[in-house]
């Protein structure tokens, strides 16, 4: 295994160090639109799931059309994310596009004449895309969008639904809804406002312009900007460190932040208090304390 330094930029413009690792074993499962068991193999389709230790990767796999996302793929993204979110051995999830030309160019517009031909069909289509965004956003595992190249339209919503966005230098971002007479979904607009503020959100949506990598970093849309040859190593190294931490703590942090953003009602406060009590009664809490006193790395099991 070789190790090298990475040249990632954080949102504050500072270099963020990381190690580049090679030789990790990767197991790939192919997913099918008919909900077949991916572990039984089958023909290669448009969504791939890869497992590398505790990290799962969901690949949007249509490189010939810049990974444009079909209606069937939106449904499959929902299914795959739900499955990974309830798999104990998975501690983090990466979403990416196949290749390095595009994360995804957005929804497959060639389907719109059939799939969005009138109000009822457009409503059904929007329900499917919203389900995918919501499932990713509510996934209990840490999620990272690893972005190479173009990230446009609906792909922006996928990226925003993830907890973090790490991008390769040269990536481009945009929401061209105004050029298609489409009103971007309310939840996704809300996430855009949360990330970049109302003025930048209006700018992006009004103009339908393309935002370059440096501006995306400066406005807070992405959290890391990394040389293309180093993005994969940086992302997986980061998530391996996350996976070494106590899963209950990481999940609790995510729940707390999401509760704060949604509004801390008394019901949510009680849920957070209960989570904190559960964590201190866990085996991992005992292991963490022992490891600290014994000056060794803790081995957390998520219970």
Image: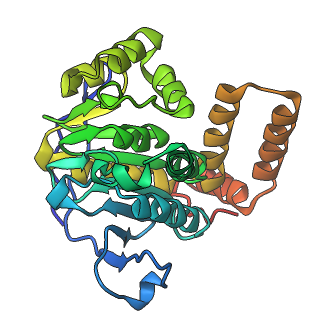
Whether residue 171 sits left or right of residue 53 in the image: it is left
Q: Residue 180 location, x and y as percent?
A: 32, 32
Q: Which of 75 and 195 is in front in this view?
A: 75
- Give me the residue at 41% from left, 31% from top: 182
Residue at the far front in the pictured view: 118
Q: Give the image quarter of residue 216.
A: top left
- Give me the residue at 46% from left, 14% from top: 197
Residue at the far top in the pictured view: 199
- Give me the residue at 17% from left, 44% from top: 5
Question: In the picture shown, does residue 230 fall above or below 207?
Answer: below
Question: In the picture shown, does residue 29 fall above or below 206?
Answer: below
Q: Give the image quarter of residue 270.
A: top right
Q: Quadrant location of the N terminus?
A: bottom left
Q: How is the image coloured?
A: rainbow
Question: In the picture shown, does residue 11 fall above or below 251?
Answer: above
Q: Is residue 9 visible?
A: yes
Q: Quadrant location of the C terminus?
A: bottom right
Q: Residue 102 location, x and y as percent?
A: 20, 48
Q: Residue 58 location, x and y as percent?
A: 38, 62
Whether residue 296 sits left or right of residue 200 in the image: it is right
- Give me the residue at 21% from left, 71% from top: 23
Q: Which of 272 and 198 is in front in this view?
A: 198
Whether residue 193 sits left or right of residue 30 in the image: it is right
Whether residue 297 sits left or right of residue 2 in the image: it is right
State the count of labels: 0
Q: Residue 235 location, x and y as percent?
A: 31, 49
Q: Can residue 175 be seen in this view?
A: no
């Amino acid at each position: 295994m070789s190790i090298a330094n990475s040249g990632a930029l954080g949102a504050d413009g500072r270099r963020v160090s990381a190690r580049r690792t090679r030789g990790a074993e990767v197991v790939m499962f192919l997913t099918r639109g008919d909900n077949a068991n991916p572990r039984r193999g089958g023909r290669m389709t448009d969504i791939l799931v890869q497992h590398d230790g505790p990290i799962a990767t969901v690949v949007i796999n249509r490189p010939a059309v810049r990974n444009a996302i079909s209606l069937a793929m939106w449904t499959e993204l929902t299914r795959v994310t739900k499955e990974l979110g309830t798999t104990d051995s998975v501690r983090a999830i990466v979403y990416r596009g196949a290749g390095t030309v595009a994360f995804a160019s957005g929804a497959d517009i060639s389907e719109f004449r059939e799939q969005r031909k009138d109000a009822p069909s457009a409503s059904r289509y929007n329900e499917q895309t919203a389900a995918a965004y919501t499932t990713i956003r509510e996934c209990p595992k840490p999620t990272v969008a690893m972005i190479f190249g173009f990230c446009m339209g609906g792909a922006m919503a996928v990226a925003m639904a993830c907890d973090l966005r790490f991008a390769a230098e040269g990536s481009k971002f945009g929401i061209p809804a105004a050029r298609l007479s489409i009103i971007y979904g309310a939840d996704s607009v809300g996430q855009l406002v949360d990330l970049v503020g109302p003025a930048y959100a209006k700018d992006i949506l009004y103009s339908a312009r393309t935002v370059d990598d440096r501006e995306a970093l400066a406005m807070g849309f992405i959290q890391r900007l990394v040389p293309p040859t180093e993005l994969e190593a940086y992302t997986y190294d980061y998530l391996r460190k996350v996976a070494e931490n106590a899963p209950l703590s990481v999940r609790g942090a995510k729940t707390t932040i999401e509760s704060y953003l949604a509004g801390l009602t008394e019901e949510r406060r009680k849920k957070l208090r209960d989570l904190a009590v559960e964590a201190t009664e866990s085996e991992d809490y005992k292991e963490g304390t022992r490891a600290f006193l014994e000056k060794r790395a803790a081995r957390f099991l998520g219970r």
